[in-house]
Image (spheres, rainbow, N blue to C red):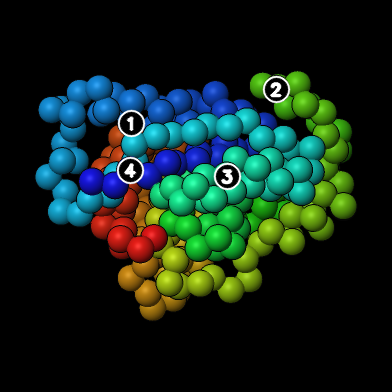
């Protein structure tokens, strides 16, 4: 059984100590301590998540965000480790960019795949209440974000999209259309009725994540 290192990317105005990031860290650690209670052992393939890294990356600019994430990602790739990207909200946006750039499997949870309108509505000076980091959302910030959008998705890269249909922040139809439009079996989509941007279906989604990881090809 091969072990994936999962890099979990938090959302905007959050940190590596986010509720979802810590939830994933806890469940993976718990399965490692108590394998007899791990319901995923019946899955047919060999892949699973064995480690979760939950970095706090800067949000002062999109460039700083991506550079900080790559500083964690690239050493793992250089050691030929199996890496899985997972992100929520803005973290999902960056997971998509980096997954497509480095041909890595990635998971998006209520991802802000069209982030410019969301952030443009919050233009001005801000402070991340969790980290104390000060930053400004302006035209330059929004233009920089567009450099990390992926105009054309590579359908040969494995991706899992998990969304709450009633998410009040992101453009849910846009996210769904991006990953349902292409004729590929590499993109998996699960849309849950109701919910909210914080994501109300994490327990159910874990089963989807386990199946997604278990069925990844050996050459990921």
Identified at 44% across, 66% down, the residue is 157
Identified at 69% across, 59% down, the residue is 148
Looking at this view, name the residue that lies furthest to the bottom: 183
Q: Nearer the viewer, residue 190 or 55?
A: 55
- The quarter holding residue 218 reads bottom left
Mark 1 sits on what residue? 28
- In terms of sequence position, does the residue under pointer 4 or pointer 2 come before the other? 4
Mark 4 sits on what residue? 3
Q: Nearer the viewer, residue 169 or 66?
A: 66
Looking at this view, name the residue that lies furthest to the front: 79
Q: Residues within 10 Å of mark 2 (few under 14, many from 20)?
A: some
Q: CA distance from mark 1 to mark 3?
A: 22 Å
- In terms of sequence position, does the residue under pointer 1 or pointer 3 come before the other? 1
Mark 2 sits on what residue? 131
Place of residue 27 in the rendered image (x, y in percent of width and height, measured from the top left)? 32, 28
Q: CA distance from mark 4 to mark 3?
A: 17 Å
Place of residue 211 in the rendered image (x, y in percent of width and height, measured from the top left)? 25, 51
Mark 3 sits on what residue? 75
- The quarter holding residue 101 reads bottom right
Please tell me whether mark 4 sits on a helix, a strand or a loop.
strand
């Amino acid at each position: 059984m091969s072990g994936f290192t999962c890099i979990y990317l938090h959302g905007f105005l959050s940190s590596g100590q986010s509720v979802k990031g810590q939830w994933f860290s806890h469940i993976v650690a718990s399965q490692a301590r108590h394998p007899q209670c791990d319901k995923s052992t019946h899955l047919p393939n060999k892949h699973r998540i064995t480690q979760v890294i939950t970095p706090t990356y800067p949000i002062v600019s999109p460039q700083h965000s991506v550079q900080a994430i790559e500083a964690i990602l690239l050493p793992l790739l250089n050691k030929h480790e199996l890496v899985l990207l997972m992100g929520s909200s803005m973290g999902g946006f960056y997971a998509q960019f980096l997954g497509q750039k480095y041909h890595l499997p990635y998971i998006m949870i209520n991802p802000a795949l069209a982030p410019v309108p969301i952030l443009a509505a919050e233009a001005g000076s801000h402070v991340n209440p969790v980290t104390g980091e000060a930053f400004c959302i302006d035209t330059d910030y929004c233009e920089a974000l567009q450099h990390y959008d992926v105009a054309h998705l590579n359908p040969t890269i494995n991706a899992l999209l998990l969304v709450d249909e009633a998410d009040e922040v992101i453009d849910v139809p846009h996210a769904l259309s991006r990953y349902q439009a292409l004729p590929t079996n590499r993109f998996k989509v699960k849309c849950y009725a109701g919910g909210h941007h914080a994501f109300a279906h994490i327990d159910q989604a874990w089963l989807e994540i386990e199946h997604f990881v278990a069925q990844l090809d050996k050459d990921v």
